[in-house]
Amino acid sequence: MKHYVIALAAVASMLGGCGIQYSTGARSGVVYKFSEKGRWTNSGEGTLTTAALRGNAQSGISNTWNFSATDPQVTAKLVAAQEAQHPVSVKYSHLFLRNPFKTDTAYIVTDVVVAK
């Protein structure tokens, strides 16, 4: 019984710390892949290819960044940018701890600016 209480306390403290912002930032590139996931909590999960190495397939260097999106408006902008292959600049929050039941990454995109 003691082990169950300790395990429950550890899980509660981990989930209680989820969503605490660690840092913010911005990245730019092209949305390489994007999918919407989730059964109970929906999130968008994607990969951004940075503009610096885009089109340089000969070098064998891959510079990608995985991210998550939880806002439906942000998700719609990312899907539209991916379909048109327009470069984007994204602003994100890096979470100290992520909720493993909500997103795949700790990088949550909060805003998208599409370059045309």
Image (cartoon, helix red, strand yellow):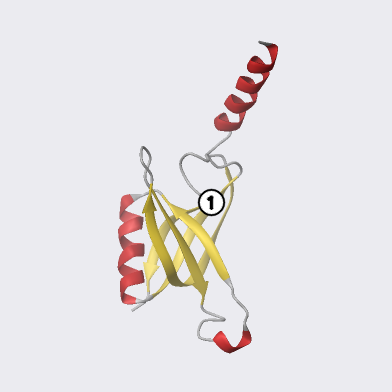
Q: Is residue 68 above or below residue 14?
A: below
Residue furthest to the top in view is 1
Residue lying at 36% horizontally and 45% vertically, measured from the top left = 42
Residue 13 placement: quadrant: top right
Quadrant of the snapshot with the C terminus: bottom left
Is 13 left, or right, of 104 in this rendering? Answer: right
Quadrant of the snapshot with the N terminus: top right
Image location (x, y in percent) of residue 93:
52, 52
Q: Is residue 62 above or below residue 72?
A: below
Residue 39 placement: quadrant: top left
Image location (x, y in percent) of residue 52:
56, 81
Image location (x, y in percent) of residue 28:
49, 71
Residue furthest to the bottom in view is 58
Image location (x, y in percent) of residue 8:
60, 21
Q: Is residue 82 above or below residue 16?
A: below
Residue lying at 46% horizontally and 54% vertically, measured from the top left = 68
Q: Is residue 41 above or below residue 12?
A: below
Q: Residues within 10 Å of mark 1 (few under 14, many from 20)?
A: some
Is 76 left, or right, of 19 in this rendering? Answer: left
Q: Nearer the viewer, residue 23 or 45?
A: 45
Residue lying at 38% horizontally and 67% vertically, measured from the top left = 113
The amino acid type found where label 1 is placed reads Thr
Q: Which residue is mark 1?
A: 105
**Element type at mark 1:** loop
Q: Nearer the viewer, residue 106 or 36?
A: 36
